[in-house]
Image (tube, grey):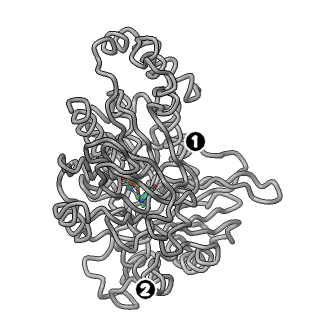
Amino acid sequence: MLNAFSLATALFARSSVRAMASLSTAAAPTGRVAVVGGGVTGLAAAKSLINQQVPCTLIDMGGRGVGGRVSSRVLELEGGQGPLSFDAGAQFFTAATPEFQRELAGWAAAGAAREWSGRHGRIAAGGDFELGQPGSSGGFFDAGSGQAMWVGTPTNGALMQHMAQELLAAAAQKQQQQQQQGQWQDTSRQQAAPLFELLSGVAVQSMERTGGGGCGGSGGRWALRGSRQGRAAAAAPAPPPGDQEDLGCYDAVILADAMPLLPGSAGHVAGIDAAASSLAQLARSVQAVAPQPCFALMVAFAQSLPGVPFDSATVEQPTTDCTSSSGSDGGSSSGNGGSGSSAFQWVACNSSKPGRPGGSSPQCWVALTTPQRAQHLLRAHPLIGPGGRFNPQTGEYRAAVAAELLADFRAFMQPFVQGALPEPVHVSAQRWGRAFVTEPLGAELLFLPAQRLALCSDVAAGGGVEAAWRSGRAAGETVGRMLRSA
Ligand SMILES: Cc1cc2nc3c(=O)[nH]c(=O)nc-3n(C[C@H](O)[C@H](O)[C@H](O)COP(=O)(O)OP(=O)(O)OC[C@H]3O[C@@H](n4cnc5c(N)ncnc54)[C@H](O)[C@@H]3O)c2cc1C
């Protein structure tokens, strides 16, 4: 398998002639873009900017590196029982459009993505499992519809790290080319302003449109401020902007997530709506889009569960959920449908994905709750704590949720397992406060040229890895084009 750097070198070798030709006529970079959010959207936006030689800084508050909702947990059990690997966020992705298929081909060639061919299907409300048929619809992100299901290898999160590594390598090469072409006359300027910069574990907390001051220049620029404590900073009220850390001045900003516009969220950025009334309007429309929460349960068993007829299953819910044993609030922990709704909308054997630990390693399962079950859990374990502040997921928080969800999982899985479901060797949980977008704004991106501000991500384009990637790419193209023609 090629590592990220050797892949980038190999790609560069193949495309170097064309790249040099286009560089000779390209304008020198004119402005710098901040991309706020390092999920698949932000990574795609940054790639597009780098391709246009527009300098950019990607800022992400995640404590475990880039990736956002494409996130994985790999851990080692005590006693040498082998590694555990869970995809806690996005489970897999499909590729319907030629542009994304080309991108995927590059990842696959680098060994960073592989097809997950397995027994994918659905569990009907009555509790029976049916293998998916080509053309069938309604599965979790189109699972089991016959479309190829892809995963990152060795984990989905690793694919995001691969994307970031590719950006760093591509930017370094382009910058070297620019130097060779004489586009950077002043090497000290280049050192001060690399083509690509990644600020990981950094939360943007405020933005101000400024015509001068610390940002210099006569035109409007954005001054970004925040915290290098990343997501953890959200647990306490943000200090006044003047007391926040200076994160730099930018000629344009791409918001690659909706959180910056949402007060009370971990990623809220103060000051955006003060810049123009249209931005305030934008914030209001984003707030109107109701996101769905979700909890991921991660469970491992020392041995493979015997008799389970699927590798992944979308769980169908009864048409009305008023038959649920605890009403329609998702509080039921019923197992396989039957008369009640299930706690889960998706269950998968993570170990059945390619590139995951095999052999004698424990078998790892991921189950994703329905929005209703998540809402019910959020009542006892809220997303927003006292005082309207973001309530972080502590170890205690995760353990309490995991214990509740394990009971759901046991009831759900028992009918599919031969014999009694064994005791797990590991149980944990992950909260996703804004997991799925139900009513996207219906555009690949929203762009305010006068303010030099773009909003992309699945909140604009609709849910899913491919839509997010396309949205980010479109934002990068649009903002890059604007800066190059300014
Ligand atoms: C449990 C779950 C399962 C899913 N399963 C699938 C699936 O199987 N297939 C599929 O296609 N899709 C799936 N999805 C959806 C998919 O993961 C998302 O649509 C996609 O990853 C969104 O990417 P994004 O970059 O737009 O947002 P995100 O991945 O959320 O990235 C946004 C990033 O911005 C950062 N950020 C926000 N505000 C700030 C700030 N102020 N400062 C710094 N950083 C900030 C966040 O920390 C985050 O890292 C799933 C989602 C979840 C939660």
Q: Residue furthest bottom?
A: 326
In which quadrant is the N terminus drawn? top right
Q: In the drawing, does residue 149 fall left or right of residue 99?
A: right
- Compute the Cα span from label 1 to label 2: 35 Å
| Residue at x-position 34% and y-position 15% | 23
Label 1 within 8 A of ligand 1 by Cβ: no
Q: In the drawing, does residue 401 fall left or right of residue 362?
A: left
Up/down of 412 relative to 302, above or below: below
Up/down of 342 relative to 201, above or below: below
Residue 2 sits in which quadrant?
Answer: top right
Q: How many marks?
A: 2
Front residue of this view, candidates 417 and 101: 101
Instruction: Name the amino acid type tagged 2.
Output: Gly
Disc nearer the start of the sequence (1/2): 1
Q: Secondary structure at mark 1?
A: loop
Up/down of 158 relative to 455, above or below: above
Front residue of this view, candidates 33 and 444: 33
Quadrant containing ligand 1 reads bottom left
| Residue at x-position 77% and y-position 55% | 81
Local crowd size for mark 1, using a 10 Å CA cut-off: few (<14), some (14–19), many (≥20): many
Percent position (x, y) of residue 408?
Answer: 52, 78
Residue 288 sits in which quadrant?
Answer: bottom left
State the residue position of label 2.
331
